[in-house]
Amino acid sequence: MSLRGAAFIAGAYEHPRRDIPDRTVPQIHAEVAVGALADAGLTMADVDAYYCAGDAPGFGPISMGEYLGLRCRTYDSTETGGSSYLVHVGHAAAMIKAGHASVALITLAGTPRNGGAQPGSSGAAPAPESEFENLWGATIVAHYALAAQRHMYEFGTTSAQLAEIKVAASLHAQHNPHAFLRDVVTVEEVLASPLVADPLHRMDCCVVTDGGGAIVVVSPEIAATLPRRSVKLLGQGEAAKDTNRGRIDLSHTGAVWSGARAFAEAGVTPADIDYVSIYDSFTITVLVTIEDLGFCEKGQGGRFVMDGGLVAPFGRLPFNTDGGGLCNNHPANRGGMTKVIEAVRQLRGEAHPAVQVPNCQLALAHGTGGALGTRHMSSTLILGQPDA
């Protein structure tokens, strides 16, 4: 069953604050839900499907559905880390196409700066691999550093090339009044920042912020009645990659499969894409994902990002024009939601004028949940104009 054209993103909202000591997590979920619905021209009474992930408190959709006053026909709490919300878009579209929903609300919220869940933490029972990996002090950044070291060894990638990704993000963030880090940085400044896990420096790492976001996915029939321009879902793919029982290949991510599936469903190629929102938990995440999605040959990511290759609006592949997780926002330690939101802004022509891609017709949003060095989920969305 193809999801091409089965649903539209009609509403998108990102919480404007990055440090929120005066709100609970449920309150932030509620604020972004109201914001996204207002953006779409809808209300809570219109929602008949609700989606949330591991950031939602209590019993997830049960607790939050009651808190928001929802009476839905279907609920989903699929948990795949930072990629959850892109997975939810695909699941919502499938339910809409099957006739089980017409307006789906997807929310994210968290307060890691004010006592909430920290990066890599989970309220779930210990995973089966924990007693083997955690015994040796494995950390989130160490898993990504492992992938970066392998890429450098295998393809000659350099720390300076990784730094180009942070520089591009900072050039974009300077135009975002809500961005957590708005100062433009240089390659030299990134390399001079403290080493966190060799070869990753502090500026290679995403920010830790409170906040949240929400999107509203609707049927084509509902989209046609709304005053705001909706964004059409053209393709969606998801794929998990794990350690393969100890025989893991660190040179690629699940984007190899999720991207191929999304492009095939959309009927477009990487060369057709005008703008990308790519999960940027670390600079290495972006570089490997660009390769795996087919924007350049494997091992050529370092060269691809140089010389302003990712800088909007006229780089060879404008990316993360809000500043991304590296500079703008990584709410609840989960950056997938904001990737979709910025892609919607670009397609609507509502990004900051300094970074708006001219005549943006096709956008890609990609989320990663987990860790590149061990196990993760990849999810890719291809989005386009209503008439695409």
Image: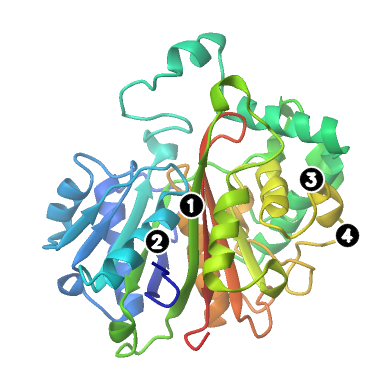
Q: Earlier in the sequence, mark 4 or mark 3?
A: 3
CA–CA distance between discs 2 and 4? 35 Å
Task: Label 3, secondary structure: give it.
Answer: helix
Which of discs 1 and 3 lies nearer the camera? The answer is 1
Whether label 4 touches label 3, CB < 8 Å? no
Position above or below: 214 against 159:
below
CA–CA distance between discs 4 and 1? 31 Å
Position above or below: 129 against 239:
above
Residue at screen point 56% across, 27% down: 244
Give the labeled residue for mark 1. 238
Furthest residue in direction front, as rendered: 1
Which of discs 3 and 2 lies nearer the camera? The answer is 2
CA–CA distance between discs 3 and 2? 33 Å
Task: Label 1, secondary structure: give it.
Answer: strand
Quadrant (top left/top right/bottom left/bottom right) for the N terminus: bottom left
Task: Label 4, secondary structure: give it.
Answer: loop
